[in-house]
Image (spheres, rainbow, N blue to C red):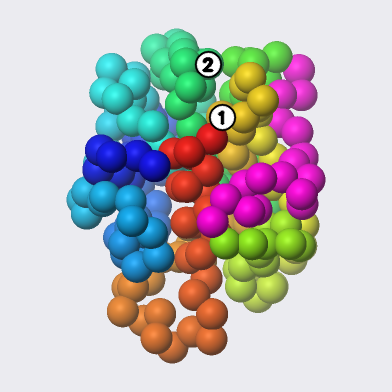
Amino acid sequence: MPTAAFTFTRLQYASGDWDTDVRMPANLLHSLVEYTTVPIDTREKVVPLAGSAVFDAPFCYLSGHKLVQFNARERDNFERYVNQGGFVFVDDCNHDIDGLFARSFEEEMRRTFGKNPLKKIPDTHPIYRAFFRFDEGPPTTTFELNGWGDDLVHDYLKAIEVNGRIAVLYSNKDYGCEWDYDFRNKRWLAEDNTKFGVNIVMYALTS
């Protein structure tokens, strides 16, 4: 179990809109405090992907609605970070397979890691057992069910694996918007929908 305080690190990139879902980090951090014994830094940290601070973070978050087009330094840092053991959770706020964020981010991954680097992960993957159990794979979000975007439910997540572990976890399910609310409003939910976020962080820290 990690002993240093966990910091939610958001990646800032030069293109697109990287600063989405502003309440989500605090909500997820609250869940880590509630359910786990991981020491937490309660402040979100924003680091430029082009800078050196990214290499100090064991977990990074990248999201947006618009174009993702890394410059040379961002691309180099992303590749080095991933190959050196880092973990990036990437969430498409549009939750559409062929939207601008999805198309441009997936192209960036091809430019960086080669042809078809993102692979569907099975429902039996350890990330679905990393803390809570999700026997049916990734939980559905309300944003997939409300008629917005492509009106599809994506029953899988994709990943780039390095040395047998997920290094880039990629979601079209818009978890960022799903978890973008004041954590005090969880009392109105029949089930805390941030639990899968706990799994993602625990997998990143312990795998």
Residue 130 as seen in the image, left or right of residue 98: left
Instruction: Provide the residue designation for mark 2.
Output: 83
Q: Which residues are magenta?
A: 115-131
In which quadrant will I find the C terminus? top right
Label 1: how many residues lie within 10 Å, few (<14), some (14-19) or many (20+)? many
Query: Is residue 55 among what the camera can see?
Result: yes
Q: Secondary structure at mark 1?
A: strand
Above/below status of 28 relative to 160: below
Q: Main secondary structure of the magenta part?
A: loop
Q: Judge whether residue 107 can be spotted in this image.
A: no
Q: Are marks 2 and 1 in contact (CB under 8 Å)?
A: yes
Mark positioned earlier in the residue sequence (2 or 1): 2
Residue 161 position by quadrant:
top right
Identify which residue is drawn at 39% across, 32% down.
Answer: 58
Q: Amino acid at mark 1?
A: Ala
Q: Nearer the viewer, residue 87 or 11?
A: 87
- Residue 55 percent across, percent down from the top left: 34, 21
**Residue 97 vertical position relative to residue 76 in the rendered view, above or below:** below
Residue 196 on image: x %, y %: 55, 59
Asked whether residue 122 is drawn in magenta, I would say yes
- Residue type at the position of mark 2: Asn
Badge 2 marks a residue whose secondary structure is helix
Q: Quadrant of the N terminus?
A: top left
Residue 182: x percent and y percent?
A: 32, 73
The dot on residue 167 is 1
In the displayed structure image, the side of residue 167 where residue 188 appears, left or right: left
